Image (tube, rainbow, N blue to C red):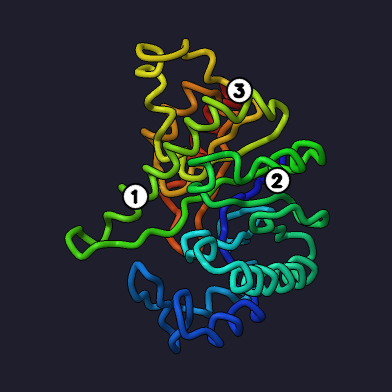
Amino acid sequence: MQSIDIHQHFWPEPFIAALRARAAPPFLDGEVLVLHEGRFAIDLRQDDLAARLELLDEDEIDAAVISLQPTLGTRDLLDGEQDELEHAWIEGAREIVAASGGRLQAFAPRRHVPDFAGTSVDARDFAELAGIAALLGELERTATPLFVHPGAVTQSQSVPPWWTAVVDYTAQMHVAYFRWLAEGRARWPSLRIAFAILAGGAPFQLERLGQRGPATRAALDTNVFFDVATYARRSIELCAETFGVGQLLYGSDRPVVEPTQTLRAMRGLVNQWRNS
């Protein structure tokens, strides 16, 4: 069975050049990424194809899917600026996929690109589905998977540095997942959709949903998947008990985090399932 990492990020050279050419967030100032959220040191050596393939070998992963993280805030730019950055990423990603010998595939940002593995969108787009209804319809019609990832945050100075990743991103994913349960799957029932970071832990709320809303079983859908990136054994096992191992997808979130605990937990769960 092929092992796949569905949640990696990669900046191709054309995209890096486009970031360097900008003077407003998001942009690169030397080796520092500047966002509305703050300034972050970046190691661009992690966006070397040979180095990324070597990491796949170390993790014993056959293939990975790369995407442009919506946390950069491209969704919030004027249309022309957004298109310029996203098209630079798409063209660069196309070259990386070809050069990888099939070991890397790509999710296209907020659009259907026929030669890509799927499409990724900002979780904030799920606050109101009307704005992405045409895209969702096109993805369902073409049997193209959708990956939902947290989007950008404008951070205040009154919270600790971990707040965005632990609170804001998970809250966005909660909204996206429950909006899908409330409205999306009835309109696009055959669309395959994967929610990053276990939908921010939203599946843990299904028992409460059963008390306040529809029956819990109504939330179970074989076209809905959950990326396990950044979580470990207890969280992953709880989701597996709820949805079954088959609805969980391994994601590393490289190069943002070091995924050893997630990979170990996922492999242990799969081995347990195979031996049961």
Side of 224 relative to 240 (left or right)? right
Expressed as whole percent of the image width and height from the top left, the position of residue 224 reads: 60, 31
Residue bearing mark 3? 221
Judged by depth in the image, the label closer to the viewer, 1 or 2, is 2
Q: Residue at x 82, y 41 (%)?
A: 142
Q: Position of residue 131 (x, y in %)?
A: 60, 45
Q: Residue at x 53, y 65 (%)?
A: 74
Q: Is residue 133 visible?
A: yes
10 Å crowding of disc 1: few (<14), some (14-19), many (20+): some
Q: Secondary structure at mark 1?
A: helix
Dot 3 or dot 2: first in sequence order is 2
Measure the C-alpha gap from mark 3 to mark 2.
21 Å
Q: Which residue is mark 1?
A: 168
Amino acid type of the residue tagged 2 in the rendering:
Leu
Type of the residue with mark 1 = Asp
Callout 2: SS: helix
Secondary structure of residue under mark 3: loop
Q: In the rendered image of this protein, does residue 109 appear above or below residue 217?
A: below
Q: Is residue 264 left or right of residue 16?
A: left
Give the class, few, some or many, for how many residues have Cα within 10 Å of label 2's Cα (few <14, many ≥20).
Answer: some
> Is residue 141 or residue 5 the one in the foreground?
141
Contact flag, marks 1 and 3 (Cβ < 8 Å): no
* Labels 1 and 3: the sequence-earlier one: 1
